[in-house]
Image (cartoon, helix red, strand yellow):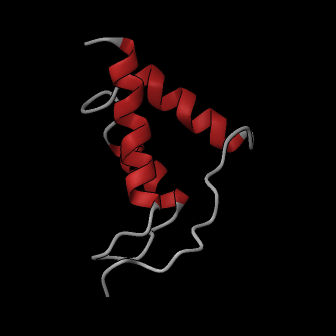
């Protein structure tokens, strides 16, 4: 698998868990990071998960807070 695909897989999972969805509230960054940490070396590339964790731990990346209401309620 391409390294880019491995990076996108981890980024997508973290973003999806952290984001507001029509069917559930945003679960937060800790839950997103916990999800990829649980799958480290199993579902997700070890080095990519480590790099992701480091970026958030060092404050070098964060998501903008969602300000819009869900489309469906």
Q: Residue at x 42, y 26 (%)?
A: 7
Image quadrant assignment for residue 38: top left
Q: Residue at x 33, y 22 (%)?
A: 5
Q: 36 or 1, which lies in front? A: 1
Residue found farthest to the bottom: 73
Answer above or below: position of 39 versus 4: below
Q: Position of residue 9 (x, y in %)?
A: 34, 33
Q: Position of residue 36 (x, y in %)?
A: 39, 43
Answer above or below: position of 4 versus 66: above
In which quadrant of the rendered image does the C terminus lie?
bottom left
In which quadrant of the rendered image does the N terminus lie?
top left
Question: Left or right of 15: which side holds 63?
Answer: right
Image quadrant assignment for residue 44: top left
Q: Residue at x 45, y 70 (%)?
A: 26
Answer above or below: position of 35 versus 58: below
The mark tally for this picture is 0
Q: Residue at x 64, y 43 (%)?
A: 56
């Amino acid at each position: 698998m391409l390294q880019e695909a491995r990076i996108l897989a981890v980024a997508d999972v973290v973003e999806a868990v952290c984001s507001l969805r029509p069917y559930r509230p945003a679960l937060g960054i800790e839950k997103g990071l916990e999800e990829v940490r649980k799958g480290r070396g199993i579902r997700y590339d070890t080095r990519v998960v480590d790099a992701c964790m480091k970026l958030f731990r060092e404050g070098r990346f964060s998501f903008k807070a969602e300000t819009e209401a869900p489309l469906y309620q």
